[in-house]
Image: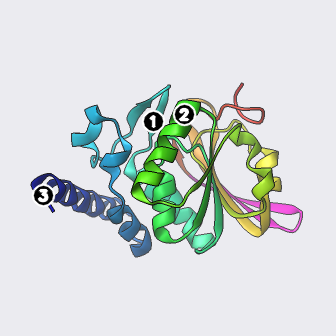
Amino acid sequence: MNESERLMAARRSGMVRDLRHKGIVDERVLEAIGSVERHRFVGEESRNAAYEDAAWPIGYGQTISQPYTVAYMTTLLLERCPPPAKVLEIGTGSGYQAAVLDAIGYRVYSVERIPELYERAVRLFRALGIPVMCRLGDGSLGWEDEAPFEGIVVTAAAPECPQHLLGQLSPNGCMVIPVGGQDMQQMTVYRRSGDRFEKELFHHFAFVPLIGREGWN
């Protein structure tokens, strides 16, 4: 390990300590967060700040979510849907959330609507040996050919819960999604029980909008 790698590893350990201090206590989530090199998923201009608990722009009006948000959503999923479940991520973006899900042990499928981000993420996954299956398309419609999924994680804000995504959950499957207006949303978990869906509400966050047929137009 060279000096730059040691520095990044130290910053990553500091980020994990910070997340623990902020209330992320699931050791599986902390271990996964600590194993994924977040600095590889941000632009060169953000690399030195990659392990701060902040969101950074990745181009095309999109961001990489702050580590706390990634850890929080991952915890909600993990408490209801243990690996090696088949999980669909909506909004590949930088690829960081998918990489964390993979590190926990999920079989990850991810949909991205922006071609440049899709291509960048695919290249990065290949370079890092991360076996995420990716698709370019409207994330609000999910990935019907690969459904059902035991878990779905939506990393963009929906005005309402997309019905296509609910329909792609397996029996007892769950979806973690921020729902609300474009400025602020409430983290919501939907759990499938036959043809019914139970809903749980959690903290408020601010995400970029989910663009698509069942999102924001």
Q: Regarding mark 1 in the picture, which secondary structure is present there?
A: strand
Q: Which numbered disc, 2 or 1, marks the residue closer to the eye?
A: 1
Judge whether residue 126 can be spotted in this image.
Answer: yes
CB contact under 8 Å: marks 2 and 1? yes
Q: Residue at x 59, y 32 (%)?
A: 114
Residue identifier under label 3 = 2
Q: CA distance from mark 1 to mark 3?
A: 29 Å
In-image side of 131 versus 145 (left or right): left
Residue identifier under label 1 = 63
Residue 131: image location, x then y, percent: 53, 61
Q: What residue type is disc 2 on?
A: Val
Q: Regarding mark 2 in the picture, which secondary structure is present there?
A: loop
Q: Which stretch appears magenta? A: 188-202
Residue 27: image location, x then y, percent: 39, 74
Residue 56: image location, x then y, percent: 37, 36
User: Which class describes the residues within 10 Å of circle 2: few (<14), some (14-19), or many (20+)?
Assistant: some
Task: Tell me which secondary structure the magenta stretch mostly adopts.
Answer: strand
Q: If you read the primary sequence from the N terminus, does the residue marked by circle 1 or circle 3 appear first?
A: 3
Residue identifier under label 2 = 208
User: Which residue occupies the foreground of this view, 21 or 80?
Assistant: 80
Q: Residue at x 52, y 46 (%)?
A: 122
